[in-house]
Image (cartoon, helix red, strand yellow):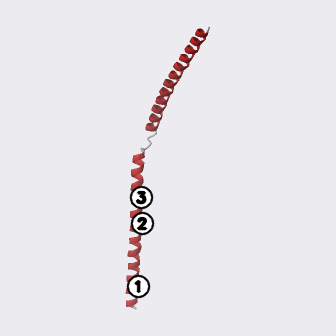
Amino acid sequence: MTQTTGRIFDEFARLVNDAAGVATGVRREAETVMRAQAERLLRELDVVTREEFDTVKDLAVAAREENERLSARLAEVETRLAKLEADKLGAAS
């Protein structure tokens, strides 16, 4: 009887082990299908890649810095122009 009981437990353990292997395979297959569907959806939505986003972000930062530099330069030129006009008006009086 002990040998029969041991064999039943061995067969049950083998069955559980096989079921776990099958479950792992099903999980991997489901992950593969879901990943493929997500990639297809992102391609259809025309979503940018991280590299493209970072590149455009860097360009925007550079453009903002250039804009600030040019704004400061313009303010300086306007100040000089106002001073020249004031000097000209003062000399004409």
Q: Earlier in the sequence, mark 3 or mark 1?
A: 3
Dots 3 and 2: beta carbons under 8 Å? no
Instruction: Find disc 1 in the rendering and name its residue.
Output: 86
* Residues packed near mark 1 inside 10 Å, few (<14), some (14 to 19) or many (20 plus): few
CA–CA distance in space, label 3 to label 2: 11 Å
In the figure, 80 relative to 20: above or below?
below
Disc 1 marks which amino acid? Ala
Q: Nearer the viewer, mark 1 or mark 2?
A: 2
Query: Residue at the spot x=38%, y=63% of the render?
Result: 66
- Which mark is on residue 68? 2
Residue 75 % position (x, y): 41, 73
Please say if 78 is above or below 90: above
On the image, which quarter does residue 68 sit in?
bottom left
Q: First in sequence, mark 3 or 2: give its number.
A: 3
As measured in the structure, the alpha-carbon distance from the residue carrying label 3 to the one carrying label 1 is 37 Å
Q: Are marks 1 and 2 in contact (CB under 8 Å)?
A: no
Q: Which residue is mark 3?
A: 61
Q: Give the structural element (helix, strand or loop) at label 1.
A: helix
Q: Amino acid at mark 2?
A: Glu
